[in-house]
Image: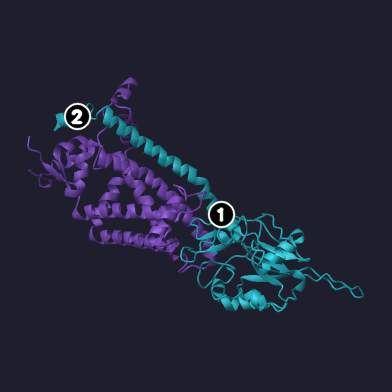
């Protein structure tokens, strides 16, 4: 089975220290005011005299979905699902920052990097992995709430955690279910903040017009074939008065 | 009878025509390879994947496409500097349409080229074509599409080029539309290009016109038959023609 890199997160261990958010910004030169990952909070209201364990923290980032709507919204394939590793990748050299993929992510995991002017999001820190390190957010987490690896490999930490808890893992539920590869153990708090994948009207126009464009080109091609057929089989001189005129 | 020839194209006109043709071919081949989305790509994703592997990745393909596109625009700027009068003459000719004469020509010509004169006679229509000027209506229609489409393609191309160089996030709506409009315009112009290439390079009727895109001149007989209104004008100006 091919790899599926994923995060399996023990939500109960998250203490909202924001270490993962800071480590990611530093490791990936994320511009000020922009973020590749986050920690969401449960709505919590302190009621005097009542002990409430309702505080929930939900670390998140790009979920490298099974069914990535961002990939479908990209016209050039600059963002694509790498089926060998299960990652959703942005080829920065091919991305022109058209922005189609950003509203197409129902989890708001993508942003347009204001320095590179291209789409950006969590990429599981490929430079660190190449050096044998864990992604920055995973490495820095003091409580080891974030566990990263190939969930199809039972010998990896993430795979073992995934297999052991398969029945009770939860995913973020969005209006558009993209089958995210981010799994939560324990109650991760806010579950329904995921929105709806919005494909920009321009991309819809391109998709909808494509069959018509192909049809017009085909019609023109048929016209040319008809003319060629007439030229080859009927000849074209009979109705042509140039010779007699000249 | 010894045929007089009439000048149709300057050397700069001939250059820009073939320069444009070469750029269009390369831009089309590289551009189609940049569209890799199953809902859009014209020939399926196999062609983009193959072309990307040939040039060493999608990023290289994009850079090549952008480079040729910028050279194409620069070529037209150069042409306008060298032969602005020629460009103005071309635009004036191409956009002057006489509805009654030219629409009749267009409809009859389409039937003649595909079904033949018998189809027109059977429908009770005189198969003779209305006289045409410097360009016939088919040439004008494709030239109009090329000029308008070319400007739209160039402008949307520059917008996309600047997207990750100059523009901020607020411009993404415009860039998204530039992508879509670029794609649609190229498709429409390409449909016309198929007919243009057939008429010019394959159809024997237009062979002298095709040759004139190299030599710059057409024989008088061709001019009189295909562009009678223009021929009537230039044949009365003795300095325009030359004995062959």
Label 2 Cα crowd, 10 Å radius (few <14 / some 14-19 / many 20+): few
Q: Position of residue A113 (x, y in %)?
A: 54, 70
Residue lying farthest to the right in this orientation: A49
Kindly identify the residue that appears in the image at 30 percent across and 43 percent down: B197
The colour applied to the residues of chain B in this rendering is purple
**Residue A51 occupies which quadrant of the picture?**
bottom right
Kindly identify the residue that appears in the image at 38 percent across and 43 percent down: B191
Please state if A69 lies on the left or on the right of B149 as rendered.
right
The colour applied to the residues of chain A in this rendering is cyan
Label 1 Cα crowd, 10 Å radius (few <14 / some 14-19 / many 20+): many
Residue B7 appearing in the image? yes
Q: Position of residue B201 (x, y in %)?
A: 25, 42
| Residue placed most toward the observer, A232 or A185 | A185
Please state if A208 lies on the left or on the right of B233 as rendered.
right
For discs 2 and 1, the disc positioned in front in the rendered view: 1
The chain holding disc 2 is A
Q: Are marks 2 and 1 on the same chain?
A: yes
Sequence order check: which comes first, mark 2 or mark 1? 1
Where B222 falls versus B165 (above or below)? above
| Residue placed most toward the observer, A60 or A234 | A60
- The residue identified by callout 1 is A72
Please state if A27 lies on the left or on the right of B84 as rendered.
right
Where B240 falls versus A71 (above or below)? above
Please state if A170 lies on the left or on the right of B117 as rendered.
right
**Tag 1's secondary structure?**
helix
**Residue A233 occupies which quadrant of the picture?**
top left
Q: Position of residue A56 (x, y in %)?
A: 78, 70
The chain holding disc 1 is A
| Residue placed most toward the observer, B157 or A70 | A70
**Tag 2's secondary structure?**
loop
Where residue A241 is drawn, which disc sits there?
2
Kindly identify the residue that appears in the image at 41 percent across and 47 percent down: B187
């Amino acid at each position: 089975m091919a790899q599926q890199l994923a995060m399996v997160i023990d939500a109960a261990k998250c203490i909202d220290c924001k270490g993962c958010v800071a480590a990611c910004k530093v490791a990936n030169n994320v511009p000020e005011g922009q973020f590749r990952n986050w920690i969401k909070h449960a709505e919590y209201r302190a009621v005097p005299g009542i002990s409430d364990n309702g505080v929930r923290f939900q670390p998140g980032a790009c979920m490298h979905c099974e069914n990535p709507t961002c990939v479908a919204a990209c016209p050039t394939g600059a963002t694509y699902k790498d089926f060998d590793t299960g990652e959703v990748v942005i080829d920065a050299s091919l991305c022109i920052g058209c922005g189609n993929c950003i509203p197409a992510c129902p989890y708001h995991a993508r942003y347009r990097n204001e320095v590179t002017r291209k789409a950006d999001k969590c990429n599981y820190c490929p430079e660190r992995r190449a050096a044998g390190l864990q992604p920055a957010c995973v490495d820095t987490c003091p409580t080891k709430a974030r566990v990263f690896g190939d969930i199809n490999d039972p010998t990896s930490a993430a795979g073992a955690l995934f297999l052991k808890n398969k029945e009770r893992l939860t995913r973020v539920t969005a209006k558009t279910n993209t089958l995210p590869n981010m799994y939560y153990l324990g109650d991760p708090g806010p579950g329904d903040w995921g929105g709806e994948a919005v494909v920009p009207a321009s991309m819809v126009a391109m998709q909808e017009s494509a069959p018509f464009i192909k049809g017009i080109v085909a019609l023109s091609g048929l016209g040319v074939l008809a003319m060629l057929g007439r030229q080859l089989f009927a000849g074209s001189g009979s109705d042509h008065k140039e010779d007699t005129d000249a | 009878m010894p045929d007089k020839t009439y000048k149709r194209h300057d050397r700069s006109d001939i250059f820009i025509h073939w320069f444009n043709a070469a750029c269009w071919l390369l831009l089309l081949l590289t551009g189609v390879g940049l569209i890799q989305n199953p809902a859009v790509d014209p020939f399926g994703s196999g062609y983009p994947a193959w072309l990307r592997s040939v040039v060493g990745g999608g990023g290289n393909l994009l850079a090549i496409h952008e480079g040729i596109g910028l050279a194409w625009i620069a070529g037209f700027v150069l042409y306008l500097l060298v032969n602005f009068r020629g460009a103005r003459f071309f635009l004036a000719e191409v956009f002057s349409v006489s509805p009654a004469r030219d629409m009749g020509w267009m409809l009859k010509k389409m039937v003649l080229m595909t079904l033949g004169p018998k189809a027109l006679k059977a429908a009770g229509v005189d198969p003779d074509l209305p006289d045409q000027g410097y360009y016939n209506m088919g040439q004008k229609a494709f030239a109009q599409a090329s000029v308008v489409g070319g400007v739209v393609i160039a402008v949307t191309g520059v917008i996309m080029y600047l997207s990750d160089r100059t523009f901020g996030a607020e411009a993404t709506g415009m860039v998204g539309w530039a992508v879509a409009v670029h794609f649609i315009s190229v498709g429409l112009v390409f449909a016309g290009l198929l007919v243009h290439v057939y008429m010019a390079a394959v159809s024997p009727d237009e062979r002298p016109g095709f040759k004139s895109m190299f030599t710059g001149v057409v024989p008088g007989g061709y001019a009189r038959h295909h562009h009678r209104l223009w021929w009537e004008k230039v044949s009365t100006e003795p300095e325009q023609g030359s004995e062959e």
